[in-house]
Amino acid sequence: MEQVLDQQAATARELPLIHGYLREHLFMGAREKADIRARMQRTADRLGYRLGKVFEEKVETMPGGIRSLGASGVGRRRGRDRAGH
């Protein structure tokens, strides 16, 4: 059993990482947010990715979530952005 868990953890580390973005609307409840996160996870699994951080854009903090996503360095590789800078 322990060997299976170690193998699953190693496989998860080898998968490419993908982040999510969730924009909350005024009437969104906790269950709806949980359902969206679960769909993101299933989609990542199906496509062969490991779901990383899900950036949440809350009604009262818009557009802070999308700024956090950009500031996190998502899309950069080895210290360079996609434009090669």
Image: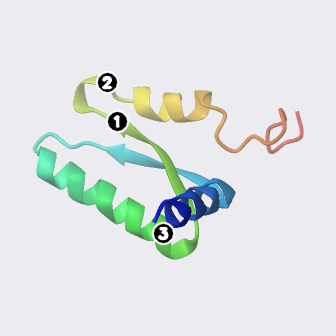
- What's the amino acid at mark 1? Glu
- What's the amino acid at mark 3? Asp
Q: Residue at 57% across / 58% down in the picture?
A: 6
Residue at the far right: name it: 84
Q: CA distance from mark 3 to mark 1?
A: 23 Å
Residue 67 position, x and y percent, is: 51, 29
Q: CA distance from mark 2 to mark 3?
A: 30 Å
Q: Which residue is mark 1?
A: 57
The foreground one among 35 and 82 is: 35
Q: Is residue 28 visible?
A: no
Bin the neighbour count of mark 2 within 10 Å (Cα to Cα): few under 14, some 14-19, many 20 and up.
few
Q: What is the image's colouring?
A: rainbow
Do the residues under discs 2 and 1 have CB atoms within 8 angstroms? Answer: yes
Residue at the far bottom: name it: 46
Residue 32 position, x and y percent, is: 17, 54
Q: Quadrant of residue 11?
A: bottom right
Residue 84 position, x and y percent, is: 89, 40
Q: Which residue is mark 3?
A: 45
Q: Quadrant of residue 35?
A: bottom left
Q: Which residue is mark 2?
A: 61
Helix, strand or loop under label 2: helix
Query: In the image, 57: left or right of 84?
Result: left
Q: Residue at 11% across / 45% down in the picture?
A: 29
79 over 18 or under it: above or below = above
Q: Is residue 49 visible?
A: yes
Q: Residue at 14% across / 45% down in the picture?
A: 30
